[in-house]
C-alpha cells in the first residue's frame, strides 16, 4: 500500500512538472527590427534569459508593417503558442481581437492596455526615468541647451520628452529644451539618417546633450552626437557601450523583465492578467551608470540623480504624465 502511494505521488509530481513546463512561448516585436539596440532588443534579451535558464525554446517574429503584426499574433495563437507576447502599442487592436478569439491563450501587450481576462498589460512610467536623465542632461550641459529626438509622434513618446524636460528644468530652471519627432508612421522607428539630421539641427542651435527615444532611429542620434563631440542619451536598453564617453547615460526601460516574467509566470502556472505599471520604485525604469559612462558622470550629477530617484520613490517629486492630459508643464 505504501509503495503504491509513493508511486502515485511520484507520478503526480511528474505530471505537475510536465504540465508546468508544457508551454510554447512566442514573441512578436515592434517594427524597427529585433536587433535595434533598444526596445526590441531588450525584449529579445528577456526571452533569451528565460530560454537559457529553463531550456524552453520560444518563437519570435519581426514584423515590418502593422498588418504583419496582427497576422503573426493570430498565427501563433492558432498554432497553440502560449503565452503570446506582443511588444508595442501598435498591436493594441490586434491583441483585442485575437485575445477574444482565443480565450484560453494567455497574451501580454507592452506599452498599452487591453482589458481582457486573458491579457496582461505592461505599461511603464517612462516620464520618471526620463526625468532622471533630464537632470543629468541639464547638469552636464555647458550651453544651457539640450535636445530630444523622438520616434513616431504619439502621446507615448511625448511622455518621454515631457519627463525629460521636467527633469532638466528641475536641475536648471533656465534650460532651453529642443524637441523634434521623426515621423508619424511606423517608419519613424527605423530611420537613423533622419535621426542624425534632426540631431545635427539641434546641435547647430546650441544643444550639447541630445536624448533619443526613437528605436533604431536613435542610433543615428547617438552617432551624430559622437561625431560632433556632444553628449547623447540612449533609451530602453543600456546604450552606453555604443559610444563610450559620448553617451552620457541611458534611460533604461526594463522591457526584458516584461517578457521574461510573462514566460516564467506561464511556465510556473502563476500567470495573471490585468495591468502592471512599472516606474522607478518598481525598478521598471531608471538610468544607466557603468564603466562606459562613469568618466563623464561627475559626483555632483550622480548625487543629484540619486536624490531625484529617492524623491520620486518617496513621492516628494511627482513627475507629470503627458498621457494624462496631453500637456507638459513649463
Image (spheres, rainbow, N blue to C red):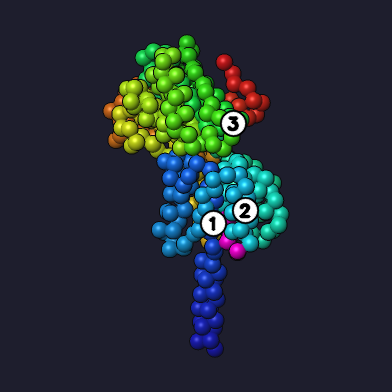
Q: Mark 2 points at which residue?
A: 71
| Closest to the observer, 293 or 33 | 33
Please indicate whether residue 231 sits to the left or right of residue 283 in the image. Answer: left
For the residue pair 118 and 145, the one nearer the viewer reads as: 145
Residue 82 x %, y %: 58, 60
* Residue at numbered disc 3: 184
Determine which residue is flagged by label 1. Answer: 26
Q: What stretch is highlighted in magenta?
A: 79-84
The residue furthest top is 174
**Upstream in sequence: badge 2 or badge 1:** 1
Q: Where residue 98 sits in the image (x, y, percent)?
A: 67, 53
Q: Earlier in the sequence, mark 1 or mark 3?
A: 1
Q: Which of marks 3 and 2 is nearer the N terminus?
A: 2
Give the residue drawn at x 44%, y 58%.
51
Locate the N terminus and report the quarter of the image it occupies: bottom right
Q: Which mark is residue 247?
A: none
Relative to 273, does residue 138 appear above or below in the rendering?
above
Residue 208 is a magenta residue? no
| Separation (CA) of disc 1 from disc 3 | 28 Å
Tell me the distance, in whole angstroms, between the alpha carbons under discs 2 and 1. 13 Å
Amino acid at each position: 500500500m505504501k509503495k503504491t502511494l509513493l508511486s502515485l505521488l511520484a507520478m503526480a509530481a511528474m505530471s505537475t512538472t510536465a504540465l508546468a513546463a508544457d508551454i510554447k512561448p512566442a514573441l512578436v516585436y515592434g517594427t524597427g527590427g529585433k536587433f535595434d539596440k533598444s526596445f526590441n532588443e531588450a525584449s529579445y534579451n528577456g526571452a533569451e534569459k528565460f530560454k537559457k535558464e529553463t531550456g524552453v525554446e520560444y518563437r519570435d517574429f519581426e514584423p515590418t508593417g502593422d498588418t504583419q503584426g496582427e497576422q503573426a499574433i493570430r498565427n501563433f495563437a492558432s498554432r497553440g503558442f502560449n503565452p503570446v507576447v506582443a511588444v508595442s502599442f501598435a498591436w493594441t487592436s490586434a491583441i483585442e481581437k485575437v485575445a477574444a478569439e482565443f480565450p484560453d491563450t494567455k497574451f501580454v501587450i507592452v506599452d498599452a492596455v487591453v482589458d481582457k481576462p486573458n491579457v496582461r498589460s505592461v505599461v511603464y512610467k517612462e516620464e520618471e526615468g526620463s526625468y532622471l536623465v533630464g537632470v543629468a542632461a541639464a547638469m552636464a550641459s555647458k550651453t544651457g541647451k539640450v535636445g530630444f529626438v523622438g520616434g513616431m509622434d504619439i502621446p507615448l513618446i511625448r511622455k518621454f520628452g515631457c519627463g525629460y524636460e521636467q527633469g532638466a528644468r528641475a536641475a536648471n530652471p533656465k534650460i532651453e529644451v529642443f524637441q523634434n519627432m521623426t515621423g508619424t508612421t511606423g517608419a519613424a522607428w527605423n530611420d537613423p539618417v533622419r535621426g542624425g539630421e534632426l540631431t545635427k539641427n539641434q546641435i547647430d542651435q546650441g544643444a550639447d546633450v541630445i536624448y533619443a527615444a526613437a528605436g533604431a532611429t536613435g542610433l543615428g542620434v547617438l552617432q551624430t552626437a559622437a561625431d560632433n563631440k556632444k553628449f547623447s542619451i540612449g533609451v530602453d536598453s543600456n546604450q552606453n557601450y555604443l559610444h563610450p564617453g559620448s553617451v552620457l547615460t541611458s534611460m533604461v526601460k526594463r522591457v526584458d523583465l516584461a517578457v521574461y516574467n510573462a514566460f516564467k509566470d506561464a511556465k510556473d502556472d502563476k500567470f495573471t492578467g490585468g495591468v502592471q505599471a512599472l516606474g522607478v520604485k518598481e525598478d521598471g525604469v531608471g538610468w544607466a551608470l557603468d564603466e562606459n559612462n562613469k568618466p563623464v558622470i561627475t559626483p555632483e550629477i550622480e548625487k543629484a540623480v540619486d536624490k531625484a530617484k529617492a524623491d520620486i520613490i518617496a513621492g516628494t517629486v511627482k513627475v507629470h504624465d503627458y498621457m494624462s492630459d496631453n500637456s507638459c508643464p513649463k
